[in-house]
Amino acid sequence: TGPISSECLGDLLRITLSAEYFEDKYLFLFVVGQSGTAWELDEAVAAQCGYTVTYTTWRSIQLRASALSCHSHLQKDVFTVTIQIKASHTPDMSNATTHLRSASCHYGPWSPREIMCENNYMEVSVRREVPQTIKDFVQDEPEDWTLVFPEAKAEEASIWQIAFHQPEEKRALLVSNAWSAGYGLNATDSRVLLRVPYTAAQVQLVEDQGITFSLLRSSTFYKYQWVILMVDTAVACPIDGVDYTNKTITWTVPKYIPPLSAGMTSFKDVLVEAGVDLHKLSAKEMASRKYVLLNELTAITMKIPIGAEGGYYKTSVSNGQLGVKYTINLFLEHQWEDNKWGLTKHTIIKEIETPFEQVEVTITSNLNLSARLMNVTVGTFLPDAELVSLTIEGVVVAVPEAVQHGYLIHRTRYANGSKAYVIQVPLDASSVTKEYIREDMRTYALNVTLAFITYPSSETFVVPVIALSAVKDAVLPSATGLCDGRNLHLIITHGNVDQNWLPFISDWHLTQEAAQKYNYILKDNGTHLAISVPFISPHVSYEVFNTSAIKASFHLTLKDDSTLAQRRNFSVSCIFSPSELIQCLPNGTVIITAIKLVGGEDLDTALLVLRDRQCKPSLVTEKTATFKFNVNTCGTSRKFNSTTMTYENEVLYFRPGNDIPIYQLKFLCLYAVEQTADVQYESKKNPPPSIKPGSGCLALSLKLFKEKSYSEPYQESEYPVVKYLREALYFEVELLQPKDARLDLNLDDCWATNSQSQDSFPQWHIFTHGCENNKDSYRTVFHKVNYSLRVKFPQHLKRFEVRMFTFFQGTSLLQE
């Protein structure tokens, strides 16, 4: 219990450091000797001194110590080990906390020879043969041994040197040199111990029954009183013998290894036991786990189903791909008797790891439309994998900082120890892309990359997360069209899917620069896209409407900015009088613009002529041809009546070799005839003008302008217009049709209401019978209209200025 726990396992002590307590901390492990000195346990020291450090799937750290490990305190049949742990949240170990833990375990009784095969070292301890005490023996003094063998210690029982038996030579090392080479040596009153790292220089690899062993053949010399004694300290441990077939692990260990059985003539099995994590398993427990233990004549075999109880899966990475390996920590204890050693106990601890098996990461997503959130669940992952960062729109963001980008990350743990990560992202986050797919559907897409690290191996892998969800929330752009007599206007109201759609006229991308080239007006205020195109424009199509009008149409397409796929088509069509194409100037000059009609696409406007075919257009575009000539030229005919002179001509198009025109545009110019007469004048009161009643259609427009210059009206997209009290409003009323210079426009009554209904109440008269309302504190001001390029008939327009006001009922403000 607590952050540190211990367990006695025969001749081994296991100390476990809790993952919950030490997680995300930097650790240093030390072993403390009887003098109180702390020795750091790095890999070399651990292998030399009989310590093994491992990690479990729960990210706990386990330390195993041999009973005869360095700095282990032996007392009777108990050995005690003291460890020190320093833990800090920073790699420089600042503000480190220190934990000290001692644990004791019973051991023995010892067999004459015991061999331990640990993960990182081999260990052999043999009974030390002690001759009978010589009568009247005088205890040796240290200087006595120094004179004979300077390297031998003067203690009562100490190791002097070790001799290695190799095929090519025999090599002897003194104790001090053996320690420097990484070997561990120890002697007690009853035993001599040799510990060998698998990486030691004198270790040989030999093969027996197809199994490779790590072998060290050696003899250890030790002194007792005035006697030098020698023991066989050969040690051998299998390093392979594992096979993986049919989802089963098969581990085979030969029984009698030649180097360990040299000089023997008889063998007898005493005990064969096996287990997991140093816990022995009974035959019944093995059967329940579907383990198989076979004790055959020459070998011991264990069979373990991959994934069976007792093992665990751990995360593995191969070439950047995520996978798993099944790991199980087996041990085998084989005891036998022979005529040389008597009883030998051979214990093998074998951590078996299956080959890499790639796995796929499950990614699921769902939308919470009411909260406008996307929830993405990634996993499951094993406990040894940890999410460390996300790549969001090309930026690497550590997990604690993800909340600053709108990402909430939750870790979900399951009963078996695995976990998943839930990523919560607002739908309106910039990293969530929206794409229109059809009708009222659009997709929300999250594209992030998750980076993981595994413990303790520090392998890294990434998981690309692409989550797509389709939602019926698409709002398509809509459009309204209108005409003002000289221009076609198309106003598009943006939806929520066209942020990246581009305006095109056929295959021509309509940009601000392109619009200016043709005197088009293109405005986008974020909510509306407005396009204004003159009646005579290269991108307007024309067709005859009845016999006295022309239908002009402007078509616009919205396309996807990446694929250029057509998304929406809009058009506006207006009916214009043919008189818009003709200008009859007072000096007798006629300017006429002929237009190419729908269906006449193959017509070459440069070949259009007047009646006199020598009269050709002065300006030609793809769709228009403009002629400028005097009424007395180009085959123009004229007719007289009492008040006017009418000039008539035609624009014609002939196919080569054909005298019958396939295009004919007839036009007239009327001029009033000037007359001179003698009249008798006398002063007389003029009778009031009389008006003959009649019926007909009038086309009127009412516009609100931004300034007194009446140069820029408010567009439909700018309504409603917000003004402060007493701020001026500039109105213009225009007679659009008919364009008859003999007509005058007069305004009679004008009133304001509190709603869009002209008959609603209350009402306030701006002017009555053409006069200002004398009850108004700020009277209406009429402005004179002068001739200009825009105003051909000033008598067809009326302009007036009104000060902004509001309606009251009693003392209460009325609002619509």
Image (cartoon, grey):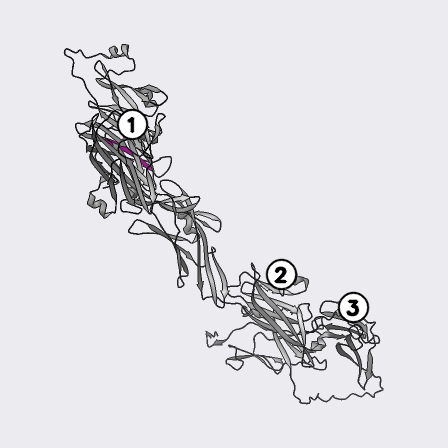
Q: CA distance from mark 1 to mark 3?
A: 114 Å
Identify the residue at horizontal 32%, vertical 19% (top origin): 172
Q: Position of residue 400 (x, y in %)?
A: 39, 48
Quarter occupied by residue 485: bottom right
Q: Look at the numbered disc 3 and give the secondary structure of its residue.
A: loop
Circle nearer the N terminus (2, 3): 2
Residue depicted at x 25% and y 12%: 145
Q: Which mark is residue 618?
A: 3
Residue 96 is one of the magenta-drawn residues: yes
The amino acid sitting under disc 2 is Thr
Residue 511: give its label.
2
Q: Nearer the viewer, mark 1 or mark 3?
A: 1
- Mark 1 — residue? 259
Residue 160 seen in the figure:
yes
Q: Earlier in the sequence, mark 1 or mark 2?
A: 1
Query: Which residue is more in the foreground, 729 or 661?
Result: 661
Sequence-first disc among 1 and 3: 1
Which residues lie in the magenta part?
81-98
Tell me the distance, in whole angstroms, between the alpha carbons under discs 1 and 2.
89 Å
The one nearer the camera, 199 or 497, is 199
Q: Amino acid at mark 3?
A: Ser
- Per the model, the C-alpha gap separating discs 2 and 3 is 29 Å
Q: Position of residue 35 (x, y in %)?
A: 25, 25
Q: Is residue 607 left or right of residue 313?
A: right
Quarter of the image for residue 530 reads: bottom right
The reply to whether dot 1 and dot 2 touch (C-beta < 8 Å) is no
